[in-house]
Amino acid sequence: MSFPIENRAGMSEPAFASLAAVLAGQRSFKHALDWMYSHMQPLLLDDIFAQDEYSHDAIVSGWDGLVLVYDVT
């Protein structure tokens, strides 16, 4: 199962394709956390915002100067 990855930053197609390839293997937020903490300088989980009782947005910074937002349900 793959999840949609949106280019809301207006990245170039090659840069976005590179990011999408990295994120494609993340099938759960646990996979995302494992990926974040596997870096020599771990990525930062800056904040988690509750949208409702089931949905959250997780804000991650530190990857190639980008801020990633995960929609977690």
Image (spheres, helix red, strand yellow):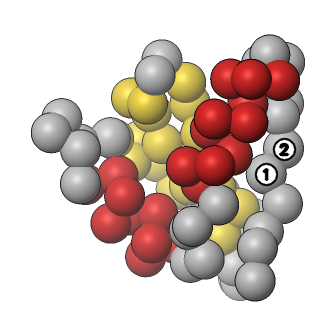
Q: Residue at position x 33%, y 66% from top?
A: 34
Q: Secondary structure at mark 2?
A: loop
Whether residue 30 is visible: yes
Instruction: Say above or below: 14 vs 30.
Output: above
Q: Amino acid at mark 1?
A: Ile
Instruction: Say above or below: 53 vs 45.
Output: below
64 relative to 44 in the view: left or right: right
Residue 20 position within the rendered picture, expressed as x and y whole percent measured from the top left = 69, 46
Q: Amino acid at mark 2?
A: Glu
Marks 1 and 2 in Cβ contact (< 8 Å): yes
- The residue that label 1 is drawn on is 5
Residue 32 position within the rendered picture, expressed as x and y whole percent measured from the top left = 46, 63
Residue 1 position within the rendered picture, expressed as x and y whole percent measured from the top left = 75, 83
Per the model, the C-alpha gap separating discs 1 and 2 is 4 Å
Q: Secondary structure at mark 1?
A: loop
Callout 2 environment at 10 Å: few (<14), some (14 to 19), or many (20+)? few
